[in-house]
Amino acid sequence: MSDSPCTQPIHHDIKTFASVVANALVRAEVADRLPPRFTRSGPQLWDAFRNELTEADLLDLTVRDLAVAMPQFFALNQLWPEASGDELRTISPTEADQYITEAIAQADQPREAYLQAQARALSVRLPSMESLNILPHPEAHHRILELTGTGGWLAYTMASHPDATVYYWENFTVACGTWQELLLAGLIALELGAPTRRELPVIFDPTLARVLNGDVAFDWIIGIREENQSRAGALRSFLKPEGQVVLL
């Protein structure tokens, strides 16, 4: 990405990043979507080869592997432009062990509860379950823009509907306004088994300048009313003739 979601010092945020990504990594291991590093045979292999390395090094190495597969969400310099890439090594072994232990303890959470917990940890405020009832049921060929504020949660909700014919990484463009929203969108993509080594249509775009200067006309534009009411009228010009804006 040419833009980046945070220009502030990251030392206050790296622990949050480490905790939520540890949750995602362990959960993916338990579901056999990633090789074991923290579960099953992983700890024994680590103990055999670690030498002077600590649990913080293990977490750092595993996140680096994930960043190769999905860099737009998990490479530190995509979230923080000033990141050197070594920030996870500032976490103490005790802290890393705590994050891993907690992740293992809650690895079998139901998907929705897991993602809601990740959103809370990232301070992304999700809309109420009741308000989600007004979301549309798009057709398979529709293009949908999710506005800033929800980090892919609305796209996830629509794509997870029992009768859904749309896919999180195919039909939706997700605009994010903070690094937390961008990371949440990536955590959702990882949870849903999105393709790796491919840039997904999730972008850091707080003002919507990038997405609305593109050449995509949308069938639906969705978002939370509190954050997007003031620009709802302007957004209509980026809809197809029959398209609609839906604000929760």
Image (tube, grey):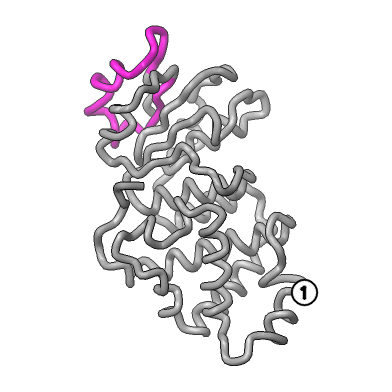
x and y, in percent, of residue 232 in the image: 28, 23
Task: Please tell me whether residue 217 is drawn above or below residue 96 in the rendered image.
Answer: above
Residue 134 in view (yes/no): no
Foreground: 167 or 98? Answer: 167
- The range drawn in magenta is 220-244
Horizontal side of 115 relative to 26 (left or right) equals left
Image position of 17 (left or right of 81): right
Q: Is residue 218 magenta?
A: no
Between 81 and 134, which is closer to the camera in this rendering? Answer: 81
Residue beneath the point at 50% across and 34% down: 155
In which quadrant will I find the C terminus? top left
Amino acid at dot 1: Ser
Q: Residue 48's quadrant in the figure?
A: bottom right
The correct choice, above or below, for 48 with respect to 7 in the image is below
* Left or right of 55 in this view: 4: left
The answer to whether residue 221 is left or right of residue 64 is: left
Mark 1 Cα-neighbour bin, 10 Å: few <14, some 14–19, many ≥20? few
Name of the residue lying farthest toward the top: 241
* Residue 32 visible, this angle: yes
Q: Which residue is at a point 59% across and 26% down the rendered structure image?
A: 166
Classify 19 as above or below 220: below
Q: Given the current orientation, which residue lies at the most extreme bottom position?
A: 52
Among the 4 quarters of the image, the one containing residue 211:
top left
Q: Is residue 60 above or below residue 4?
A: below
Question: Residue drawn 57% across and 81% down?
Answer: 55
Q: Residue 143: x, y in percent?
A: 48, 22
Say what secondary structure mark 1 lies in. Answer: loop
- Which residue is located at x 39 percent, y 24 percent? 221
Residue at numbered disc 1: 41
Residue 3 at x, y percent in the picture = 29, 48
